[in-house]
Image (tube, grey):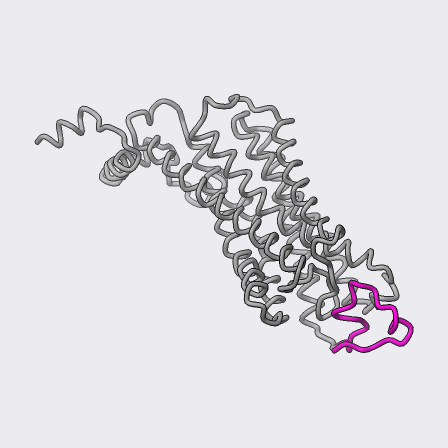
Amino acid sequence: MNTSVPPFANNTPFCYSINSPPFSYQPSIASAYFSAIFTTLGVTSNLIAFVVLVKSFRRTHSRSRSFLIFLGGLVVTDTMGLLVTGSIVISFHVTHFNWRQLDPKCHFCNFMGITMVFYGLCPLLLGAAMATERFMGINRPFARSTNMPKSRTVSMVSMVWLIAGSIALLPLTGFGSYHMQMPGSWCFFNISSKGNDLAFSLLFSLVGLMSIAVSFLLNTVSVVTLIKVCCGQDRTQRSREHEVEMMVQLILIMVIASICWCPLLVFIAQTVLSGGPLETKLLLLWLRFASFNQILDPWVYILFRRAVLKRIYPRFNWSRSSIMTMYPSFSDTLRRLTRSSLGSSPGPDEAAEAQK
C-alpha cells in the first residue's frame, strides 16, 4: 500500500505519481534470497561462459570468430544487466531505503528504468543479429568476405547496443515514462493504455517479438540449408561440423529467449491494447520468468560444444560421414525432402532408382 508523506504531498516527483513511497514493507525472505541467489548464479554462469568463449576464440578458425564475438557481446550484456539491476534490488531488500529521500528528482529511478529496457532488448536484438550472421554465412557464403574483420563484427554488436540504448532513452524525451513499480524495489516504464505510454509499451513489445520472429525465420532457413548440404551430393565438399555446432547453439538461444520473453512481451501488449488495469502479480511473475534468460543463455555455450558432448558420449563418432552412414534411410529421406522443398533436381542415381 502507498503511504502519503507530508513533505512531498504538494510536490510529488513524476516518477512517484503512480506509486509513491515509502510503502508498508512486508518482510519477505523469499524476495531477498531470490534476488541474491539469482544474481550470484547468473553472474557466475556468465563469467564461466566468458572464459569458455575466450579459449574457443583463441583456437578456432576465422570463419567461426564472428559468431563467437556475438556470443561474447551477449555474455557481457547479460553480466552487466545482472550486476546493475541485481545490486539495486538487493540493496533495497537489505537497507529498505526510501526512494524519494534518496532520489527526489527521479534520476536514480530513470536510470534503473533505462537499464531494465536496455538489458531487456539487447539479448533479443543480439539473437536476431546472430541469426542474420549465420544466415549470410550459410546461405550466402560468397556474398561476404570469408574472413570477416573482427572490427566489423564488433561494430555490429555496438550498433545493437546503440539501438537498444536509443529506445531505452525515449521516455526521457516524453515518449513514455519511467515510474516506481510495486513492491517498491524497481522502476520500469509505465504500462498504460494512454498516450505516449501506450506507444512506448507497444514499441518495446513489438521490437522484442519481431526480433524473436526474425530469429525463428532465418534460423529455420539456415537449418534447412545445412540439411541440404549435409545430405546432398555436395556433402563431401567441405566439413560443416563447426556450422552445425553454431546452429545448435543459436537455436537453443532462440528457444530459451522465446520461452522466457514471449509471456512478458505478449502480456504488455495485451494489457495496453485491452485498456484494463495492470495486474502487478502477473507482471512480476513474467518479469522473473524473463530474467531466467540471463542464467540459461551461458549454459548453452558451456555445455553444447563438441568438446563437452564428446566427453559425455565418448563412443559416438562426430564425423558427418559416420552420422550419415549410421542412418542411410534417414539420410535418403532428408535428401529427398530438402530437394523437393528447395526445388533441386534429383541426381542421376536417384533418377535411375525412380525409373525402376
Most foreground residue, 55 or 234: 234
Q: Which residue is at a point 81% across and 69% down the rendered structure image?
A: 96
Percent coordinates x, y for residue 333 in the rendering:
24, 39
Percent coordinates x, y for residue 313 in the rendering:
41, 44
Most foreground residue, 139 or 255: 139
Give the quarter of the image for residue 90: bottom right
Judge whether residue 7 is colored magenta.
Answer: yes
Q: Which residue is at a point 80% across and 71% down the rendered structure image?
A: 21
Q: Is residue 316 left or right of residue 265?
A: left
- Is 324 rendered above or below residue 101? above
Give the position of the C terminus as an image quadrant. Answer: top left
Most foreground residue, 249 or 270: 270
Q: What residue span does the magenta drawing correspond to?
A: 1-25
Q: Is residue 226 left or right of residue 334?
A: right
Q: Which residue is at a point 71% across and 67% down the rendered structure image?
A: 32
How many numbered discs, if any?
0
- Is 140 rendered above or below residue 95? above
Percent coordinates x, y for residue 195 in the rendering:
66, 60
Judge whether residue 315 is colored magenta.
Answer: no
Give the quarter of the image for residue 127: top right
Percent coordinates x, y for residue 61 in the rendering:
53, 25
What secondary structure do most residues of the magenta stretch adopt? loop
Most foreground residue, 341 or 179: 179
